[in-house]
Amino acid sequence: MHLVYPAVLSALLFCTGLYGVLARRNAILVLMSVELMLNAVNLNLVAFDVWLSKAARETLHSGQALTLFTIAIAAAEIGIGLAIVLAVYRNRGTSDIDRLRDTAEGPATDGPGTGAPAAEKAEATA
């Protein structure tokens, strides 16, 4: 098997994941897109490991070992990421990334359009 087939498939998977990260507004879909990107990297690691081991005639499969570490890290990342998304959803009621701000801050009270002119207008009439 040629190295081109898994490399092209990996590039397509990575580009699909990158599009999902940049275009999606739902946090869970963004996490799924990151997982897709990690799987594209894993596919590249295994494909190049097989290709290099055939060329060098060595039995040390470091690409496959790195893939196992990447899978373990990705599983931990998706667990923590999903827990954060669920906590934000419980507190805010939405998982839309554009509507979320820092979870530590409350509603904005100063700045344009946040009610400060209405308070000044009420003081002026009183």
Image (tube, helix red, strand yellow):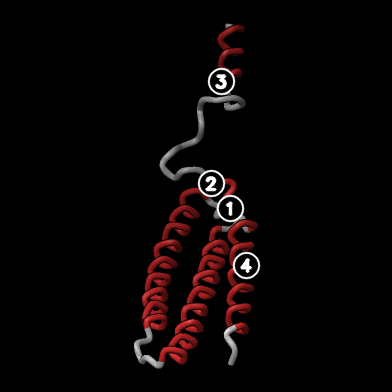
Front tag of 4 and 1: 4
Tag of residue 100: 2
Image point (46%, 59%), residue name: 86
Gap in angstroms between the C-alphas marked 4 and 1: 22 Å
Image point (58%, 60%), residue name: 21
Q: Are marks 2 and 3 in contact (CB under 8 Å)?
A: no
Q: Of the residues under marks 4 and 2, which one precedes in the sequence? A: 4
Work out which quarter of the rendered image holds the C terminus and state it. Answer: top right
x, y percent for residue 54: 46, 92
For badge 1, the amino acid type reads Asp
Q: Residues within 10 Å of mark 2 (few under 14, many from 20)?
A: few
Above or below — where is 7 with respect to 123?
Answer: below
| Local SS, label 3 | helix
Q: Are marks 2 and 1 in contact (CB under 8 Å)?
A: yes
Tag 1 residue: 96
Q: In the shown orientation, is residue 39 left or right of residue 64?
A: right
Q: Of the residues under marks 1 and 3, which one precedes in the sequence? A: 1
Q: Are marks 3 and 4 in contact (CB under 8 Å)?
A: no
Q: Are marks 1 and 3 in contact (CB under 8 Å)?
A: no
For badge 4, the amino acid type reads Cys
Q: In the shown orientation, is residue 106 left or right of residue 21?
A: left
Tag 4 residue: 15
Above or below — where is 38 with respect to 55?
Answer: above
x, y percent for residue 10: 58, 76
x, y percent for residue 121: 61, 13
For badge 3, the amino acid type reads Ala
For badge 2, the amino acid type reads Leu
